[in-house]
Image (cartoon, helix red, strand yellow):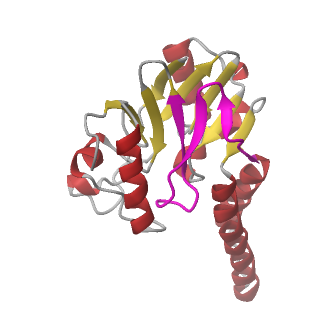
């Protein structure tokens, strides 16, 4: 199995750096997993052209060679380059798909009603919502196992159905954990992101991630060794 980070992500505002408002464009860490004939891109957070370049630089691959895209969560920072992989299967956990899809549809309905009531159309907001809904509709619920040694690992809390990928090799276990563990600094301080759907669930998922994996791929950082067995 080949696991490598294609692009290191970042938070728009990192509270551990004293940032309270966005000071940069946030994007998710993008990881490549190759297991036999299965080629998986996880969380394509960069715009398509930039991600295509990184994929070639880091792995010598073209977007057409990717067989699957897996989203740990459905968020603007994880889907920016999703269109690049038009020929791949797009996958997300069933819980995340349902937990995000219903609120998105409701937000679009309220936006349309507000436009009608005011007589002014917020075309940009509606287009953004419609794009997200269209992308989510194409995402299929992921099976428990994506390939030999590549299994779903639920990490709810930051979002309703955030789900990582547990990669089992002979000598180590790697967990692509998305925003359940945001950065190496969050790992060191045993901290979760502030804006969680459920802080209690996020803390529980953080603890599970730390307990199970030898290596962690945080949602907004490079791969890190996990030298802690408990939080």
Task: Decide if residue 26 is on the left or right side of residue 50.
Answer: left
The image quarter in which residue 216 lies:
top left
For the N terminus, which image quadrant?
Answer: top right
Return the x and y of residue 166 as percentages of the image width and height. 52, 35
Q: Nearer the viewer, residue 99 or 45?
A: 99
Q: Is residue 166 above or below residue 34?
A: below
Question: Over which residues does the magenta segment extend?
Answer: 139-167
The image quarter in which residue 104 lies:
bottom right
Q: Residue furthest top?
A: 60
Return the x and y of residue 141 as percentages of the image width and height. 73, 48
Task: Decide if residue 229 is on the left or right side of residue 40.
Answer: left
Q: Nearer the viewer, residue 81 or 151?
A: 151
Q: Nearer the viewer, residue 72 or 7?
A: 72
Q: Is residue 2 above or below residue 162?
A: above
The residue at 23%/54% (across/down) is: 16
Task: Decide if residue 24 is on the left or right side of residue 98.
Answer: left
The residue at 33%/43% (across/down) is: 183
Residue 153: say if magenta. yes
In the rendered image, is residue 125 in sight?
yes
In the rendered image, is residue 124 in sight?
no
Residue 33: say if magenta. no
The image quarter in which residue 91 lies:
top right
Task: Decide if residue 99 is on the left or right side of residue 189.
Answer: right
Q: Residue furthest bottom?
A: 117
The residue at 73%/49% (across/down) is: 135
Return the x and y of residue 103 as percentages of the image width and height. 66, 70
Q: Nearer the viewer, residue 29 or 188?
A: 188
Return the x and y of residue 70 as percentages of the image width and height. 63, 38
Number of numbered discs present?
0
């Amino acid at each position: 199995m080949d696991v490598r980070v294609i692009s290191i992500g970042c938070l728009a505002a990192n509270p551990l750096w004293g940032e309270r408002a966005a000071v940069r464009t946030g994007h998710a860490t993008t990881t490549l997993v190759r297991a036999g004939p299965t080629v998986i891109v996880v969380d394509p957070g960069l715009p398509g052209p930039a991600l295509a370049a990184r994929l070639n630089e880091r792995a010598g691959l073209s977007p057409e060679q990717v067989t699957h895209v897996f989203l740990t969560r459905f968020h603007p920072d994880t889907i920016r380059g999703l269109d690049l992989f038009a020929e791949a299967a797009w996958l997300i956990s069933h819980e995340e798909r349902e937990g995000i899809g219903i609120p998105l549809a409701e937000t679009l309905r309220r936006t349309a009603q507000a436009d009608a009531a005011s007589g002014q159309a917020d075309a940009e907001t509606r287009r953004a919502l419609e794009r997200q809904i269209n992308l989510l509709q194409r995402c299929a619920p992921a099976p428990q196992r994506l390939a030999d040694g590549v299994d779903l690992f639920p990490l709810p809390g930051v979002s309703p159905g955030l789900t990582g990928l547990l990669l089992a090799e002979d000598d180590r276990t790697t967990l692509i954990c998305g925003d359940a563990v945001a950065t190496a600094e969050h790992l060191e301080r045993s901290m979760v992101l502030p804006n969680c759907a459920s802080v209690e669930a996020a803390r529980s998922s953080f603890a599970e991630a730390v307990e199970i994996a030898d290596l962690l791929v945080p949602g907004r950082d490079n791969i890190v060794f996990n030298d802690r067995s408990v939080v």
